[in-house]
Image (cartoon, grey):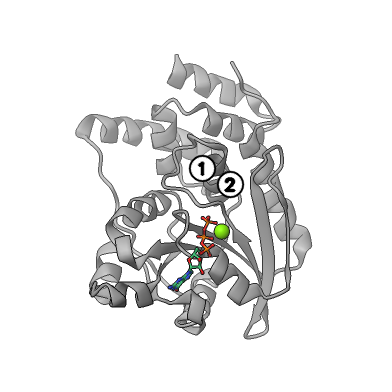
Amino acid sequence: MGLTRRSGGSRAMQEGFLKRQYSGADYVVALAGNPNTGKSTVFNALTGLNQHTGNWPGKTVLRAEGRYIHRGMIFKLVDLPGTYSLMANSPEEQVARDYLCFGKPDATVVVADATCLERNLNLVLQVLEITTRVVVCVNLVDEARRKKIKIDFQLLAAELGVPVVPAAARHRHGLDKLVEVVSEMAAGRITTRPVAIRYGEEIEESVRKLEPKIKKLVGEEFNSRWLALRLLDKDRAVLAALENWLAGRNSLAAGMEGVILG
Ligand SMILES: Nc1nc2c(ncn2[C@@H]2O[C@H](COP(=O)(O)OP(=O)(O)OP(=O)(O)O)[C@@H](O)[C@H]2O)c(=O)[nH]1
Ligand SMILES: [Mg+2]
């Protein structure tokens, strides 16, 4: 049934933990976003030459990591592949999603395109379902200005419940502020109130039943609501990653699989 320990999810997860342990970085920051929103431009501007690339384990998806120092702290920045969603429909989506959930970055920057913000917010909402430590960087504001698009950043931040930083990364505009906010977020000095997507009563009821069971298995380690939603969606990739994390307690995971997929 395809539950294998070689799944990308479990590897990404292990990588996340190992990298944090041995990389010597104080904080790990993920860069997510739709394709072509300027993630790599932000990444390059912040890390300069302090970066290396390779592939994500088991995938032909490019992985770029780099570092920068801010106020004496070392930040490891992980440039995730551009995706429109986190439904794991492609290797890119799976890499991004597994890293956000199981890699447990201290902060996640979602880079959004100011010229088509509405479309980009779809991914922002999906990321907010996985992690609360999110900073939204609305990039390409120079292009938006040229197109006479006006954005109320304060209102956007209030509606999303997380900080929003406008930027024009190509010109380095807004990046000092971004680095400052990310640093506060990673250090846990910002309280967020992410807007929560509510599903129909039937789904919410199932989530209410499932969440305590998941919490019992993984504690506060991962976002149990998100895991519950994924399992209700019969998401085998997430199940495989969970099973791997529960190594040594496989019988419990198998029991859970029986309950959920049965
Ligand atoms: N005008 C303008 N162009 C920008 C800005 N930031 C990035 N770009 C341009 O947008 C294009 C895409 O930038 P990338 O940094 O490669 O975007 P990306 O999100 O990494 O793209 P993928 O990795 O393919 O998902 C490049 O041509 C950049 O020069 C900006 O703030 N203003
Ligand atoms: Mg890129």
Corner quadrant of residue 233: top left
**Which sits in the foreground, 186 or 165?**
165
Q: Residue at image x 47%, y 48%?
A: 83
Numbered disc 1: secondary structure = helix
Corner quadrant of residue 37: bottom left
Numbered disc 2: secondary structure = helix
- In the rendered image, residue 1, in percent from the top left (x then y), is placed at 59, 15
Q: Is mark 1 within 8 Å of ligand 1?
A: no
**Which sits in the foreground, 39 or 155?**
39
**Amino acid type shown at disc 1:** Glu
From the viewer's perspective, tell me whether residue 33 is left or right of residue 254: left
**Amino acid type shown at disc 2:** Phe
Instruction: Give the CA distance from mark 1 to mark 2.
Output: 14 Å
Number of residue marks = 2
Q: Is residue 74 visible?
A: no
Query: In the rendered image of this protein, does residue 56 appear above or below residue 116?
Result: above
Residue identifier under label 1? 93
Q: Residue at image x 35%, y 73%?
A: 143
Looking at this view, name the residue that lies furthest to the right: 22
Pointer 1: residues within 10 angstroms few (<14), some, or many (20+)? Answer: some
Q: Residue at image x 34%, y 59%?
A: 194
Q: Quadrant of the C terminus?
A: top left
Mark 1 or 2: the one toward you: 1
Residue identifier under label 2? 102
**Which sits in the foreground, 195 or 245?**
195
Pointer 2: residues within 10 angstroms few (<14), some, or many (20+)? Answer: many
- In the rendered image, residue 257, in percent from the top left (x then y), is placed at 51, 21
Query: In the rendered image of this protein, does residue 174 appear above or below residue 124?
Result: below
State yes or no: discs 1 and 2 in contact (Cβ < 8 Å).
no
